[in-house]
Image (cartoon, rainbow, N blue to C red):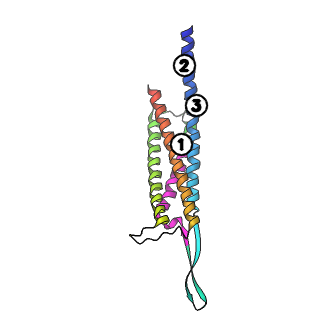
Amino acid sequence: MGEEGQVKALEGSSNIGRSGVMATVPLLRVLALFATAAATIVMALNKETHTFVVATVGNTPVKLTLTAKFQHNPANVMFVIANGVATLHSLLMLALSFVSHTYDLKGLRFLIVAALDMMTIALVSGAATATVFMGELARHGNSHARWNKICDNFERYCNQGSGAIIASYIGILFLMIVNMVNISKRGRLSL
């Protein structure tokens, strides 16, 4: 009787662990969805306008108005698109997780979801890295190429872009954790 009780206790603990993992994955997907959506919205709304005095004719200043927008930089446009795709991916995977028990495709679903997760991570990571590179040029310039820094004139624009980049990397982190949990869950099920 002692052995049977131990076996039942072990079986019960594995069910608790499995249900905990099942609840963790949707929560992590929701967090990834919010992070990538925040990155998309913050960068898409990133715009700042400044007026500069470029010359003085007599007593009248000649002014030039410049606007910094995310659309002026292809890396930022790719960033918005990639994070938008990741947001849509997280939303679709959440919907799939709620209806997947009725449409189980004998392991094929796992492979497709894992591959899509990895492709989304790669896409967002590449876009975020390109945006970080362009942000570095905006903050510090490049004296060898004679590219002037712009963040001393458009500080709010640069800070808002930095916030979007941080949100994107948080989304990447959550997507990576989701992928690792799914793969480890699949590994445990096949044992």
Foreground pick, 137 / 26: 137
Q: Residue at x 55, y 37 (%)?
A: 25
Q: Residue at x 50, y 47 (%)?
A: 172
The amino acid marked with disc number 1 is Met
Where is mark 1, residue-wise? 93
The overriding secondary structure of the stretch rendered in magenta is: helix
Q: Earlier in the sequence, mark 3 or mark 1?
A: 3
Q: How far apart are marks 3 and 2 (CA)?
A: 15 Å
Where is mark 2, residue-wise? 10
Q: What element carries label 1?
A: helix
The quarter in which the N terminus is drawn is top right
What percent of the width, then of the height, locates residue 152?
54, 69
Q: Which residue is drawn at 55% across and 32% down?
A: 21
Q: Earlier in the sequence, mark 3 or mark 2?
A: 2
The amino acid marked with disc number 3 is Gly
- Seen in the picture, residue 165 relative to 11 is either above or below; the reply is below
The amino acid marked with disc number 2 is Leu
**What's the magenta region?**
67-91
Q: Does the magenta stretch include residue 88?
A: yes
Foreground pick, 132 / 142: 142
What percent of the width, then of the height, locates residue 162?
54, 58
